[in-house]
Image: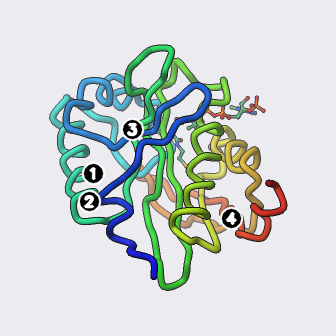
């Protein structure tokens, strides 16, 4: 029987070629603020641009509380080359009773376009199917967020839908694209 809470309470560190994915901690506030204060980074996400390091502390406090409560939460994405935290990626939502969960991700702007997020998300998808016993992994993005849609496609996800004016983000109704990958599709890719 899957012990859902234990998975995030004892969140393991994952390793990819260029990244470490480790649990978030309060000491990440400075590195988080460095990228989350950039309005281009927060342009297509529901959260507001961080105005001070206090916003980053508040985000991290809530992430650490989620970890301790065994709720799904993101990993800190650490660049091995820079030896610092450069983003987050992980599960933002999980329904164990339906064996499905949703992924989200953010990366510092200076590192965009090098395939780093796709590298992290592939590993997080592997984790979901092997450790969380998922059958379906979902992700979504605002239609204009081409980089995010490409991450999902490069990770083997299929576009399943387009919802018009789905959420009001920063005062504007945004159309969302919905993607998913099923366990049987992931197994075919192995
Ligand atoms: C979305 C995000 C995480 C992608 O990170 P990344 O590390 O740059 O992603 P990758 O390099 O793995 O893949 C991005 C792909 O999109 C492509 N791309 C980016 N902008 C593009 C554009 N305007 N038109 C066409 N392709 C574009 C890149 O070339 C790359 O594809 P390639 O590997 O085939 O060249 C990053 O842009 C980000 O942090 N954005 C702000 C936060 C955000 O929007 N998060 C997602 C919320 S749904």
For the point 70% across and 65% down, the residue is 162
Residue 28 x %, y % = 27, 31
Write down the residue under mark 4: 180
Lower position in the chain sequence, tag 2 or tag 4: 2
Lower position in the chain sequence, tag 2 or tag 3: 2
Q: Is residue 184 above or below residue 159?
A: below
Mark 2 and mark 1: span between their CA atoms?
5 Å
Mark number displayed over residue 63: 1
Q: Give the residue furthest to the left.
A: 54
Q: Nearer the viewer, mark 2 or mark 4?
A: 2
Residue 67 x %, y % = 28, 56
Classify residue 26 by image quadrant: top left
Mark 3 and mark 1: span between their CA atoms?
10 Å
Write down the residue under mark 3: 76
The secondary structure type at the circle numbered 3 is strand
Write down the residue under mark 2: 66
Q: Residues within 10 Å of mark 3 (few under 14, many from 20)?
A: many
- Mark 3 touches mark 4? (CB < 8 Å): no
């Amino acid at each position: 029987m899957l012990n859902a809470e234990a998975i995030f309470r004892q969140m393991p560190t994952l390793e990819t070629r260029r990244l470490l994915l480790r649990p978030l901690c309060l000491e990440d506030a400075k590195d988080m603020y460095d990228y989350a204060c950039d309005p281009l980074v927060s342009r297509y996400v529901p959260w507001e641009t961080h105005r001070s390091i206090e916003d980053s502390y508040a985000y991290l406090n809530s992430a650490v509380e989620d970890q301790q409560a065994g709720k799904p939460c993101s990993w800190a994405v650490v660049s091995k080359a820079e030896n610092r935290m450069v983003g987050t990626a992980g599960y933002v939502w999980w329904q164990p009773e339906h064996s499905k969960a949703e992924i989200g991700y953010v990366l510092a702007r200076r590192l965009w376009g090098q395939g780093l997020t796709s590298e992290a998300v592939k590993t997080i998808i592997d984790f979901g199917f092997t450790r969380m016993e998922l059958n379906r992994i979902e992700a979504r993005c605002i239609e204009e967020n081409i980089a995010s849609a490409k991450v999902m496609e490069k990770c083997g996800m299929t576009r399943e839908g387009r919802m018009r004016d789905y959420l009001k983000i920063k005062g504007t109704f945004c159309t969302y694209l919905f993607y998913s990958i099923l366990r049987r599709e992931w197994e075919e890719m192995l």
